[in-house]
């Protein structure tokens, strides 16, 4: 049943991703009436599917790449809706909704097979560890996308050609706020996620865990994240240079994500 | 509108009459009620509305069959405004029935305006409608036509982008500022120099929420006068560069022969503002701001030509959207005409329904003795069954009646029969 709900959710994300195009790019606000309800319904079905899937598998947390991707897709869709609710802009949906759709697509047709090597005692904490880190990743991705929108709008305004004006984009100050607030939201999530992971690892594996390449990269990612926020806040970094910085941290996140392949101890789940 | 009523519209507008003629027929809002009352008291006129704006004067009337229609409305104009027929007749246009409906829809949707897509006209039509209702000049078919015109205008505005972009220099400047800052609330505007255009732009920005106004001018008295007007703060001209970084929006309009602000100024301002964007609106000729400042990340410089280009592009966008709006209008005119035409069949439809209902009730009464043992629920089921049967049996006849009414109204030969 959970797979059916996930497929429905993915379908709804697809509908929302298509409907948001005329709403944002052609300034046809009527399409918001399709995009937003479809995204909300997709999110609900996705949540139900995830809860059912984890419950049925008796591990209650995403254990493989596909399930983790699905959870990341859900968090991104939720982030898009929060941005819409707060700033009344659907522009980010042009990028975020297709990503949610694609992230949900694979798990919807190829569910996870891996088993959980950890005791049930830690399940809740591990779930929190994964969810918090994924929330931080989602926040970073949102911030990066907002910075890209900022750059497009800035270039458009500087070009002075009305015909090339990106009227579908939110004002510069709005995208800047979305970018910065996403980062500020992501930092405590990442910090708490890493701390919880460290405590669990300390209890179950011992000090050797902290020499693992994935773990070391994760702490490097945290440092890069903190430095990025510091620079953005204190120099008011915007536009092109902000994108370079966010892009660099995003590459570190991707490295952390893919470091699972080289990790000897962090094999149970992707983050 | 029934068969013995005719919709007639006559008027003049900016395309048919010069301002000298239009101003002779213009009706001040204080006299609109009196003029409307006078119009509908003329023989043969059942309902009427007068629309008087700076660009048009139009009389929309519903007249009885056989009245002299257009000619009588011209007579009203001659008498009410005391102008000779020869002075206005060459400028008058007249529309009847469907064409009058189309014209009204186009006017309300701002397709007939001097600046296509301007939003004021709908408010003006609504104002005329309110006055006409108050004096009892609009109360039946014209009322529903005008309500339809408002709905169509709203539809045109929501389904096309006809009014989405600004076409005046001042409003283009405001639009650009909003693209940079979003809300203009609590934003600081710095007026450097004092020109009419910069004052107008500042006024627009204040209307959008800008609160802090700084004014610098070489002549201190002039700066003080403008600052008082906007409740702003005077900045001595020699402090220009120290204070400019406080402003989010700088409007320059000095008569200085060389540039006041260069690229390096922009870099310096941005540094002290920690890269918060700045918008320079340079209305001066020769220009006050070096265009190379636009290359500084976070600085946006628009001179008068840039603003004019944006306004012209918006205007051309509006023309494109107007074509889409015309399609909506044509569709709505057809729908309205069909609805009006089917109204001719209403008496026959009502008679048919009443007759069928009488037969149904009589048949039920005849069978009352045999139905006496039924429970209230069963009785209700029988009632519902007979009503449903009657409605289904009548449906083809009612549809045919409506279609016949529409085709007879549409065809003038049938009409004369």
Image: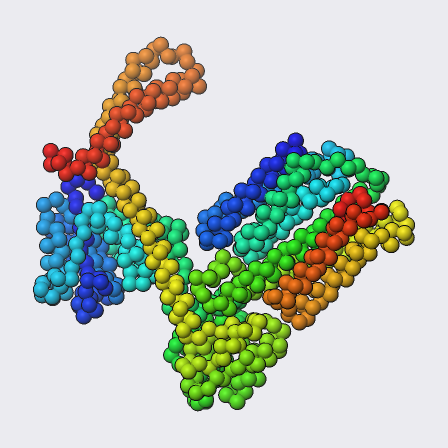
Q: Closest to the observer: B105 or B275?
A: B275
x and y percent of residue B16 in the render?
Answer: 19, 62
Q: Quadrant of residue B247?
A: bottom right
Query: Colour scheme in the image?
Result: rainbow
Q: Residue at x 41, y 67 (%)?
A: B310
Would residue B176 be found to the left or right of residue B319 on screen?
right
Taking the image as shown, residue A164 lies to the left or right of residue B298, namely left
The percent position of residue B199, horizontal first and vertical second, equals 41, 77
Residue B228 in sight from this viewpoint: no
Image coordinates of residue B96 in percent, x first then y, are: 18, 49
Q: Position of residue B83 (x, y in %)?
A: 11, 66
Q: Is residue B292 visible?
A: yes
Q: Nearer the viewer, residue A187 or B262?
A: B262
Number of numbered discs overlaid on the protein picture = 0
Position above or below: A131 against B208: above
Residue at 54% over, 54% down: A91
Q: On the picture, is B36 further left or further right than A10?
A: left
Locate the N terminus of chain A by quadrant.
top right
| Residue placed furthest toward the front | A262
Taking the view exactly as shown, the residue that stands out farthest to the top is: B370
Q: Residue at x 42, y 80 (%)?
A: B284
Query: Is the residue B36 above or below the residue B371 in the image?
Result: below
Which residue shows up at 74% across the image and 62% down it?
A224
């Amino acid at each position: 049943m959970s797979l059916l709900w996930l497929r429905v959710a993915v379908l709804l994300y697809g509908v929302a991703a298509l409907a948001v195009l005329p709403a944002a790019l052609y300034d046809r606000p009527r399409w918001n009436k399709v995009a937003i309800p479809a995204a909300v319904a997709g999110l609900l079905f996705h949540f139900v599917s995830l809860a059912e899937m984890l419950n049925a598998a008796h591990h209650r947390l995403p254990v493989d790449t596909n399930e983790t991707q699905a959870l990341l897709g859900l968090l991104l869709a939720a982030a898009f809706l929060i941005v819409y609710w707060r700033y009344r802009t659907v522009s980010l949906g042009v990028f975020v909704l297709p990503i949610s759709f694609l992230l949900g697509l694979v798990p919807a047709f190829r569910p996870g097979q891996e088993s959980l090597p950890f005791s049930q005692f830690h399940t809740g904490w591990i779930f929190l560890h994964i969810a918090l880190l994924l929330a931080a990743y989602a926040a970073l991705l949102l911030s990066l996308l907002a910075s890209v929108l900022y750059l497009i709008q800035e270039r458009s305004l500087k070009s002075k050609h009305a015909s090339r004006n990106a009227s579908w984009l939110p004002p510069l100050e709005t995208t800047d706020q979305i970018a910065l607030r996403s980062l500020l939201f992501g930092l405590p999530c990442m910090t708490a996620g890493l701390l919880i992971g460290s405590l669990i690892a300390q209890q179950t594996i011992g000090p050797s865990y902290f020499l693992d390449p994935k773990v070391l990269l994760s702490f490097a990612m945290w440092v890069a994240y903190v430095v990025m926020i510091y620079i953005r806040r204190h120099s008011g970094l915007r536009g092109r240079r902000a994108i370079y910085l966010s892009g660099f941290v995003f590459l570190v996140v991707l490295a952390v994500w893919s470091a699972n392949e080289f990790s000897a101890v962090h094999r149970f789940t992707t983050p | 509108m029934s068969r013995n009523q005719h919709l007639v519209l006559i008027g003049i507008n900016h395309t048919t009459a010069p301002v000298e003629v239009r101003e002779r027929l213009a009706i001040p809002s204080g006299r609109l009620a009196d003029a409307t009352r006078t119009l509908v008291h003329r023989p043969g006129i059942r309902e009427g509305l007068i629309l008087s704006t700076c660009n048009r004067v139009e009389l929309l009337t519903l007249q009885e069959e056989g009245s002299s229609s257009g000619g009588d409305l011209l007579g009203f104009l001659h008498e009410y405004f005391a102008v000779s027929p020869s002075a206005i007749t060459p400028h008058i246009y007249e529309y009847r029935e469907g064409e009058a409906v189309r014209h009204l829809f186009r006017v309300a949707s701002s397709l007939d305006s001097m600046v296509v897509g301007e939003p004021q006209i709908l408010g003006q039509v609504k104002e005329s409608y309110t006055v006409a209702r108050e004096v009892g000049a609009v109360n039946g078919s014209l009322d529903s036509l005008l309500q339809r015109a408002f709905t169509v205008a709203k539809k045109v505005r929501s389904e096309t982008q006809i009014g989405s972009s600004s076409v005046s220099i001042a409003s283009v400047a405001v639009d650009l500022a909003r693209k940079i800052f979003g809300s203009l609330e609590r934003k600081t505007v710095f007026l450097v120099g004092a020109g009419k255009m910069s004052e107008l732009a500042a006024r627009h920005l204040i209307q959008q929420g800008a609160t802090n106004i700084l004014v610098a001018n070489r002549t201190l008295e002039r700066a003080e006068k403008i600052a008082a007007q906007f409740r702003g703060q005077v900045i001595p001209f020699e402090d220009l560069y120290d204070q400019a970084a406080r402003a989010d929006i700088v409007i320059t309009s000095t008569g200085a022969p060389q540039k006041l602000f260069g690229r390096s100024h922009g870099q310096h301002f941005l540094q002290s503002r920690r890269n918060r964007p700045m918008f320079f609106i340079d209305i001066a000729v020769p220009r006050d701001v070096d265009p190379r400042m636009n290359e500084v990340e976070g600085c946006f410089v628009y001179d008068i030509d840039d603003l004019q280009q944006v306004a012209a592009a918006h205007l051309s966008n509006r023309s494109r959207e107007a074509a889409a709006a015309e399609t909506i209008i044509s569709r709505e005119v057809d729908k309205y005409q069909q609805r009006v035409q089917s109204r001719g069949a209403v008496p026959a439809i009502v008679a048919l329904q009443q007759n069928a209902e009488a037969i149904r009730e009589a048949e039920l009464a005849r069978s009352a003795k045999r139905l006496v043992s039924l429970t209230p629920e069963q009785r209700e089921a029988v009632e519902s069954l007979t009503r449903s049967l009657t409605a289904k049996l009548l449906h083809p006849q009612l549809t045919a009646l409506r279609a016949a009414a529409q085709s007879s109204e549409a065809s003038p030969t049938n009409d004369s029969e």
